[in-house]
Every structure is written in C-alpha cells, then in structure tokens.
Amino acid sequence: TLLADLGARVTTGADMPDGSPGMAGSVVVLTAEDDADDTVRPRFEAAGADLDRVFVINIDGSLPSIVEAADELISTLVYREARLFIVDPFATFMGKVKARETAATNQAMFQIKDACTAAQCSGILVRHLRKETKGGKAVYSGTDSIGIIGTARGGLIVGKDPEDPDLCVLAVAKANLAAKEDTKSLQYRVVSRQGPVGPIGGIEWLGTVDYHADEITVAQNQNRAAAREAAEKWLTEFLGDGPKAQPEIVAAAAEAGHAFSTLKRAKTAIGVKSEKRSDGGWNWSLPKEAM
C-alpha cells in the first residue's frame, strides 16, 4: 500500500511525502504476493496514479528469475521509460538461487543495479522482516542474505509507531547517498479509500517524527515478546484443568486475541505436549512440571 502511494507520485511527478520534489515517469511492478487486477492496480488508482504509467509484469506459469532474465528486464524498463522498479518480494524472484546465499544474491543485486542504471530508474526490493533481530539493529532486520542491504545504497523500514500502535513509521535504516541529518522518519496511517470496485487501503502521511529506524525494530521485537508472554500465560491457564483438542484451543486463542503464529511460539516456550488421539486429532497438554 505504501509503495503504491510512492509509485503513484512517480506516475504524476508529484512531490514525495517529505516534500522533496519527485520525478515523472512510469512504474514497473514485479509482484508474486498480490493480484494485479484486484489489488495492485486498484491501490495505485486509489492513490491517484496515472494508470497509463503503471505496468505490472504478467506472471504466466513459473515465476521469472531476475538472474536468468536480466536482458529482458533491461528491455522492459527502458521500453516503458520506467523511473521506479518495484520487486515484491525480492527473494521470490531469485529462481533456483537461494536468497540467503551471499554470492548468488550479490549477482542478482548487481544485475538489478545494471538494469536500473541502463534505464535511469530507481529500484525498490521488498523484503520481509526477521521474527527477531539481534541487538535490535534495523539494518540487519531483513530476511535472507546480508548482501542485499550491503549492496543497496539505501534501506527503509516500516513498523508500528512505538507510542501509538494505530500509526506507522517509515524510517531510514541505511543511507549511503545522503547525510545522516538529511534523513527523516515519516509517520503515517493506513486509511480506507474508495477504489474502483470498493473500499481499499491508502496512506495518509502525518509528517516527520523523531524516531530512529532502530527504535522501530526494538519496539517490534518488544511487542512480539510481549504478545508471546501474554499467549504463554493464557495457554497455561487454558490448559490448567487438563488436555484439550487443538481446534478448540486455536479457536479460543483467536477469540482471546492471540494470533496462531504467536500461539505456536508460546506452545514451544512452555513445553506444551501434542498427543495424537485415536480419531486422528491432536490434544495439547501442559508438561507435568507446569501443572
């Protein structure tokens, strides 16, 4: 949603959210996570994009590999007069290469760099965040090889506002081409906007805030830890009177506000046992020392 907002500005030549001047051109999107017709284009349209300048690469069958299709990528970016190239998520388009392998990742990164240089456009490579980041350093918070952020000239991170969970922050984790004092963190919220076929998410920018990217990562780690601890307490109490069927536990946890992924981490942390029943289902029970 955030990238649709930024991309829409490129298609119209509008200023960037921090007030800096933008540049007009096309946007080429390579995505495997959202459908072009019902999600990507509607988000761009709701953000005010010139849709004649938005090109979502059609994926027909197997996912294209950036490494193997470098020449086609350059041709596409040049032909479409792209000023922004978005890959979401980057690791999905590595083909047979594993994104966690630094040497292979560097090869893909340099091919993207060459393609963007030839087309005179910028590239944004989307990565997911690690479940936990040692030391809370934002620059190390992305999944896969460290070579990704090592080769990139800039790194951005998004996360919840540490003081207001209803708001979000876009922060700079790395900026090789700008002075530190020139980097800004921007606060925003996701709002509902009218899209071509109904309501769809959009971005409302709220101005600059004094957060460092590391603060966003630390807050995320702390929030995840707090959520797991709450789930541990809930699960211990729920299983306190004996084993229960897994579907019953999952349903009750969801009703109590605990995500399934958090519930699984809590299950591991307190040593909950899984026992298969004669009907093929599973029961969860507390370890004896916890009872």
Image: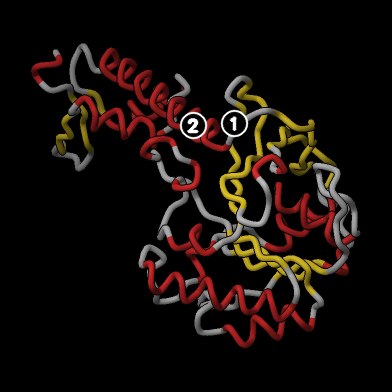
Q: Who is closer to the viewer here, 3 or 193? A: 3
Q: Quadrant of residue 50?
A: bottom right
Helix, strand or loop status at disc 1: strand
Residue 289, x across and y down, in percent = 9, 16
> How would you rate the neighbour count of disc 1 (Cα within 10 Å): few for under 14, some for 14-19, many for 20 or more?
many
User: In the picture provided, is 90 more to the left or to the right than 36?
Assistant: left
User: In the picture provided, is 131 more to the left or to the right than 111?
Assistant: left
Amino acid type shown at disc 1: Lys
Residue 93, x across and y down, in percent = 51, 70
User: In the picture provided, is 288 more to the left or to the right than 17?
Assistant: left
Amino acid type shown at disc 2: Gln
Way the structure is coloured: secondary structure
Helix, strand or loop status at disc 2: helix
Residue 262, x across and y down, in percent = 38, 32
Q: Residue at x 49, y 47 (%)?
A: 139
Q: Residue at x 62, y 79 (%)?
A: 114
Looking at the image, the residue that sits furthest to the left is 288
- State how far apart marks 1 and 2 are (Cα): 7 Å
**Residue behind mark 2:** 220
The quarter of the rendered structure image containing the C terminus is: top left
Residue 277, x across and y down, in percent = 15, 36
- For residue 267, the mark is none
> How would you rate the neighbour count of disc 2 (Cα within 10 Å): few for under 14, some for 14-19, many for 20 or more?
many
**Residue behind mark 1:** 160
Image vertical order of residue 247 relative to residue 1, above or below: above
Q: Residue at x 57, y 56 (%)?
A: 126
Q: Residue at x 85, y 56 (%)?
A: 22
Mark count: 2
Evaluate if marks 1 and 2 touch, with contact meaning CB atoms under 8 Å apart: yes
Q: Who is closer to the viewer here, 226 or 62? A: 226
Image vertical order of residue 101 relative to residue 233, above or below: below
Q: Who is closer to the viewer here, 226 or 181? A: 181
